[in-house]
Image (cartoon, grey):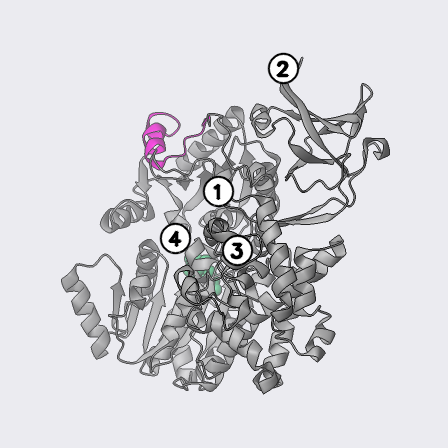
Amino acid sequence: MSDASPSNKHSRPSRVTTDQQVESPDWEDALQTPVQFVRSVGPERAALLENLDIRVAIDLLYNAPRDVLDLSNVKTPAELEAGMQQSVCGKVVDTESRRTSNGKTMSAVLIRCGRAFVRGVWFNQPWILKRFFPDNVVLFSGKPKMRSGRWEFSNPHTQWLENDDAATEDGLPVTVIPRYGLTDGLKMYEIRRATKATVEDFVHLVPELFSPEALESWKLLGIREAITKLHLPKSMDEYREGYRRLVFQDLVEFQLAIELRRRVWWSGVPAPKMPCTAKIDSRIRRLFPFNLTPGQNQAIADIVADLNAGRPMHRLLQADVGSGKTAIAMYAILVAIANGHQAVLMTPTELLTTQHWQTIDKALAHSRVKRRMLTGNLTSQQRQDVLEEIRSGDVQLIIGTQALIQKSVTFSNLGLVVIDEQHKFGVGQRAKFSTGIQSPHILVMTATPIPRSLCLTQFGDLDLTTMSDMPPGRQTVKTFRVYNANTRKRAWKFVRERLQEGRQVYIVCPRVGETEADAGQLELSFDEEFPELSEKPAEPVQETLIGSAEELFEDLQKNELKGFSVGMVHGRMNTQAKADAMEAFRTGETQALVSTTVIEVGVDVSNASVMVIQQAERFGLSQLHQLRGRIGRGKHQGFCFLFSDASSTDVVKRLSAMEKHTDGFKIAEVDFDLRGPGDILGSRQHGSLPLRFGHLIKDRKLVEETREAAVELVKSGQFDDPLLAPLKSAVLDRFAELMDLPRSG
Ligand code: ADP
Ligand code: MG
């Protein structure tokens, strides 16, 4: 099987295409029967299912339900109790919308449940009525109140049932119903029926990958029973049991791949030994204008031991913004160079490359280390020259962006790769450095503390150093949520006062110009609840705060910051213009810098003590924490103002968390809980995890359990037992390519 791409969501990839089926109706492996021939499907539905990546029978079996309706606790109106969390189910009979005496719009939906009527009401969400049609069968969940003799749910959580969801005549369903992702033209009952048929006809053929002992010790259902209970549960408990087995399998396969990768690293190509002598140590320490903190010294001790161990280092250094990771990187780099090797420092942005260059170039001013920058912005001649120097070994230290992992870059004697702000680089990208004859030491550094469940997955292949202290004298940034015109005025006055005292200010905008189509991206809660009805409410989005850097740059010079010198930097400027803008800010020539998140990581101007963030609700919390890490770096107290006039509870919760917490680890956990791993890992294609069922938040406990299970299986040698060969090949099918694992195990 060749298909091991990370996006492939099924354990056994489909091997038969729709064209081949017609010619050979006998599938050697019945599980590979094209869905078209599954009972109740046929060619038209098969074509629709293909949009969901469902091509053959087993794909349907491994198609994870999107959610599950628990209709077992649905009450009749007569059974309801005031103020308790409960559900009712009924048919929509009427909708209405009107103004209340205090100026709000109230929208109401009346449903009939058996012989009684129940109302759902919403305030200031008039568009919600567009989602209800007469005779829709819906489930309201919430805490009802009795009002004028009728039960009423305020803001109920609503689920729309399919025609065949409601099981009995009087609208009282009795069961637990999995619901699947759909595609245009495909009905829920159709995919449900197809799934049921596949379970009945094919589940007995699904191979079990776990041994009986493993099933017992992990307390898991057998695969056939699990798939059956997942798709055809008789109770929520059955559904959960089935789901748990499939999540477990999903996660443990991923964890096994990670363990295999560690094993390859440990037993593979030896890495150069790079001892750090006392002489090297003291020469390096002399370069720093400060004493290293205990945390920095500990991290350095870990790294020095790795560099001299004869096997490649694969270490993740996680430490909060401003804790002094650059010094650690420099230390490691200089040890490598002192041992006659080349070293690379890789960053996610050009701006950060430039920043690191300036810091390191200055620190190395009196040293003979030959150093170069390599970014995507060199002319082709410059690039050729640098590449040649890298190839010949003339240059010892290269600082650059992803441009460094292109094929055309060949090193003469690469000994160490330091990757800064690792979370932007995914599992797959990391693999690129470890291929080839050379096996350099790798140190990855992240400024976003990573929640534990992510650490165990995305970064599970790395040894971990956590540095929790800060350089002396660092104050925590005082953060304030600014949510109306009045407080905004006061904030700007405060900014002007600081500027007059000689401080500088960052003003961060969510976008460059007017055109980005990112409006409303965070107002997810409604659509998340009703994903099947994803049409956007036709409400015009009123923006009272300027979100565009270009616009704000003009506006501030005329209004709030009139008379001060204002600069601007954003991602659409060319490298030179960006560098100039940063330089002007660094020297204090510009007092205020309007920017986008290009300043998110690494930028270091210690005189900047205030930050204003426009439309703060548009940023992830970890991102906000990164941003405010730019200030309060010097001796001046840092202040951060989060401007936002979004008033949804979600936004208030998130921004209040920023006011309350100063610890990046705590914030990362809150962020992760509220928004999932996307923000922490950076963009989707770089960061998303290759999981089909497992969910890092919901399945947190299983992440830990599967981690232990995988480590144990590999360490004890059981994983190499022929009995587990099917499991091993399943793991390799899924991950060999992504994680650069040898097929031979
Ligand atoms: P990080 O990359 O972890 O966010 P930096 O390496 O940019 O942090 O360091 C932040 C600031 O702290 C820099 O100005 C750096 O010079 C300073 N710094 C680092 N280590 C120390 C130390 N041990 N004592 C005093 N200042 C330090
Ligand atoms: Mg840094």
For mark 4, does the 10 Å Cα neighbourhood hold few (<14), some (14 to 19), or many (20 or more) residues? many
| Distance from Cα at disc 1 to Cα at disc 2 | 36 Å
Region in magenta: 542-563
Residues tagged 4 and 1 counted as in contact (Cβ below 8 A): no
For mark 2, does the 10 Å Cα neighbourhood hold few (<14), some (14 to 19), or many (20 or more) residues? few
Residues tagged 4 and 3 counted as in contact (Cβ below 8 A): no
Q: Which amino acid does the dot numbered 3 rest on?
A: Gly
Note whether ligand 1 is within 8 Å of mark 3. yes
Q: Earlier in the sequence, mark 2 or mark 3?
A: 2
Q: Is residue 401 visible?
A: no
Point out residue 658 in the picture as x, y percentages from the top left corner.
Answer: 57, 44
Q: Earlier in the sequence, mark 4 or mark 3?
A: 3
Residue 603 image label: 4
Q: Earlier in the sequence, mark 2 or mark 4?
A: 2
The residue identified by callout 1 is: 184
Q: Dot 2: what SS?
A: strand
Q: Nearer the viewer, mark 4 or mark 1?
A: 1
183 in relation to 417, above or below: above
The residue identified by callout 2 is: 99
Point out residue 137 in the picture as x, y percentages from the top left corner.
Answer: 67, 34
Seen at 49% across and 77% down, the residue is 261
Q: Dot 4: what SS?
A: loop
The answer to which quarter of the image holds residue 119 is top right
The residue identified by callout 3 is: 473
| Distance from Cα at disc 4 to Cα at disc 1 | 46 Å
Q: Is residue 640 visible?
A: yes
Q: Which amino acid does the dot numbered 1 rest on?
A: Asp
Q: Which amino acid does the dot numbered 4 rest on?
A: Val
